[in-house]
Each structure stands twice: as structure tokens, then as C-alpha cells.
Amino acid sequence: MLPGACSTAWIFNEFRDHFEAAGWTVLTPGLRYHDQGPDQPPDPRLTQTGLADYLADLCSMIEDLDRPPVLLGHSMGGLLAQLLAARGLARAAILLTPAPPWGVLPSSENEIAAAMGLMSLGPIWDQTISAVFEIAAANSLNCLSPARQEEVFAQFVPESGRALYECLFWMFDLGRASYVNAVNVDCPLLAIAGGRDRVISPATVQKVADKYRDQATYLEFPDMGHMLLLEDGWRDVAQACGEWLAANGMD
């Protein structure tokens, strides 16, 4: 289970328990330099860390396993899952409100506004970015109660501006860090969207699924937002993931 931007393994607490109870062995690796804790200053090395660094760490971990795992990635973790699948390191991949790969344009005004907001911060590729509660509450946490919003936000950690730049401004990234060659993805994928997601719209998730043609299944939960893992309907999402895995012969 691969976390997204500003997140650590805590985001998978309910999902991990659910799948372990179903008999799965669950690994929840953190991303590089995301272990400082929400009340600690960011590791200064985070400013020079990008998607390729996250990917290298995950590749090394997966290559030590007995066989390729099933990947479940949320948001930026969904993009990392696509990059790993293109390297033959996944038996299957579940993409929960996934960040889109290189070449997929934003589909909503909210997505464009988020990118413009980051652009106003200057050269984000040399910065660490910390979430702002008011922005998170209106966007990624919009389907949580006010009390739950504060609880979840308290767990957020700083993110690499370079990684965010590579995700959101791929058209300017000469290294094409977020590029996924769909031809190399030979495993089944499930792309799940939240109908009320203001961070990665259902239309964008549909574009991600379309990139992989018949290998991908698109599923939408119309009353859920970006934090599918933490919202009231998370059990329905987990159940749908389990059913899809069983239908595709995954154990």
C-alpha cells in the first residue's frame, strides 16, 4: 500500500486491518524522508528528492520479495503504482484517486487552481511544501466532518516540492519523471474515483483508466471525495477492491 503526498502509512490503518483480516500480508512502506513526524521540521534532503527516488526505494523493496505484489496506491501513490507496474513489478494494481502520469491533462477547474496555487510559491522544485489546513479542508478533506478533518490534517507531513512539480507540471519536466509507457503495463488495474473529489476529478481518473485500455477497470463512488481510505464509506471501497481482486484471480 503506497501513500500519497504529505502522507505516511497511517492513512492505510483501516485498509490494512481489513485486508489482513481477509488473509493478505500487507506492507505499508513510507516514502523517503517522510518519517520526521507531523510536529518536526522536514528533512532538508527532501528538497532534492523526486519521484525517481521514491520509485528506486520501492523497486528495491519489491525486488526482495518472493514474487511481485498487488499494489494499492492512493493519489501520488497511485502514480507510483503505475510506474512500478510499467517495470513489471506488480501482479495487479489498485489506483485510488490516482495522480495522473505524464501527458494526462487536468480535467477540472479545481485541479488547475491547485496547480496555479503551487505556482505562486515560486520554484517549488527546490522547496518542501507543507499543507495548509483551510486548503486541505476545502479540497482533500471535504468529505470528512470538521473534527475528523482536524484529526487527519494533524497527521500530514511536508512533501517534496520537486515531486509535486514532476506530477503537476510534467510538461516542463525534461526528465519526464512521471512518464508511464502503457505498453509495458501487462497486469490488470482498477482505477477508483470519488465523485466529490476536488483534488483529482473523476474525469481525470477516467483518463488514467483509458490509458491502459482493456487492462483497466474504472469504478466511481459518487458520494466520496479524495480520502476514500478514511471517509465513512471506506468499507465499501475496500470491499469493492477485494471483489475485484478475487475476480482477477488474486490471492
Image (spheres, helix red, strand yellow):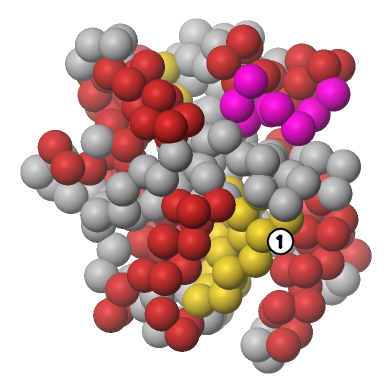
Residue visible at 61% across and 40% down?
197
- Let me know if residue 35 appears in the view: no
Residue 35, position in %: x, y? 56, 28
Residue 63, position in %: x, y? 43, 69
Residue 118 in magenta stretch: no
Q: Is residue 112 left or right of residue 237?
A: left
When the figure is inspected, residue 18 is found, relative to residue 149, above or below; the finding is below
Residue visible at 62% across and 60% down?
192
Residue visible at 22% across and 42% down?
170
When the figure is inspected, residue 139 is found, relative to residue 100, above or below; the finding is above
Q: Toward which corner of the image does residue 107 lie, by quadrant? A: top left
Amino acid, disc 1: Val
In this view, the residue in front, 193 or 222, is 222
Return the residue at label 1.
26
Residue located farthest toward the left when viewing the structure as drawn: 174
Q: Secondary structure at mark 1?
A: loop
- Let me know if residue 238 appears in the view: yes
Residue 195, position in %: x, y? 66, 48
Q: Which residues are magenta?
A: 138-145
Magenta-drawn stretch, dominant element (helix, strand or loop): loop
Quadrant of the rendering where the C terminus is positioned: bottom right
Q: Toward which corner of the image does residue 220 lie, by quadrant? A: bottom right
Q: Residues within 10 Å of mark 1 (few under 14, many from 20)?
A: some
**Numbered circles on residues, count:** 1
Residue 165, position in %: x, y? 28, 32
Residue located farthest toward the front when viewing the structure as drawn: 109
Q: Is residue 247 left or right of residue 89?
A: right
Quadrant of the rendering where the N terminus is positioned: bottom right
In this view, the residue in front, 236 or 152, is 236
When the figure is inspected, residue 191 is found, relative to residue 122, above or below; the finding is below
